[in-house]
Amino acid sequence: MLRFPLRRYLAGMRRESLGLLEIALPSVCLLCRQMPSRPGTFCAACLLGMPPVASPRCPRCDLPFTAMDGSDHLCQACTLLPPPFLWARSAGLYQDSLRRAVQRFKFQGEFNLDRPLAHLMRGMLQQSLEEFKADLLVPIPLFRRRLCQRGFNQSLLLARALRLEGLPIATRLLRRVRETAPQSGLKAFQRRRNLRGAFALEKSLRGERVLLLDDVMTTGATARECSRVLLSGGAGAVAVAVLARASLHA
Ligand SMILES: [Zn+2]
Ligand SMILES: [Zn+2]
């Protein structure tokens, strides 16, 4: 007779002590969910796995070179076919922890990763942005069907989390008017061809300086095509901010 109430009493104790433990314990990293970190941030170990693109890199498209030393210089793609944007800057390399975080943010709907990821971007962009003096922030749009499937546009979430003061976010200016085949597995020139005619401007611009925002840059084909559309629609200049920089060989 006594066993039931006693068990229930002990179970209650366990629940209560667990609750107390949760309050007493420091919060854990949003990515590994193990190491302590300030609420809503990544732990030091995960941050180490999010290295920035270091020199030598291409100053136009942020592509890292495999050489460990040497100065920044244009990559082959930017030399052969200069991109329409002035520069692209990423928060880090699309590998290790950053790749994991981007994938969880993008494909598993872990929206609470937006702020720590935006924080990484802000740190990397600060100097370039001060020099660029953007008038508009334009997140790269998704095609309607993709947006319906996913339920959100990751670039728009990042744009909002960036909280760049005084920089309006243009959510409807650039539209994706044609669905395109997935870019993965395509070579750079195939990616460019695949995207032709995929974007359109809702209205023309009058010389505004646009900061384009995307989550991952691989060949830069999407950023190139969006920049081309923006410039031919009257933008004064375009620069690109991305969360993670991948290379085709990464
Ligand atoms: Zn961690
Ligand atoms: Zn380049």
Image (spheres, rainbow, N blue to C red):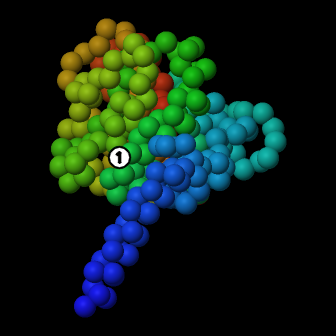
From the viewer's perspective, is residue 214 above or below residue 93? above
- The residue most toward the top is 206
116 or 232: nearer the viewer: 116
Residue at image mark 1: 111
Horizontal and vertical percent position of residue 61 = 56, 35
Q: Residue at x 18, y 44 (%)?
A: 144
Q: Is residue 245 visible?
A: no
- Image quarter in which the C terminus is found: bottom right
Q: In the image, residue 222 lies at what x, y percent?
A: 39, 40
Report if the beta carbon of the residue with label 1 is closer than 8 angstroms to ligand 1: no
Q: Secondary structure at mark 1?
A: helix
The disc labelled 1 sits on which kind of residue?
Phe
Q: Residue at x 52, y 15 (%)?
A: 132
Question: Residue drawn 73% across and 38% down?
Answer: 56
Residue 26 falls left or right of residue 164: right
Q: Quadrant of residue 168?
A: top left
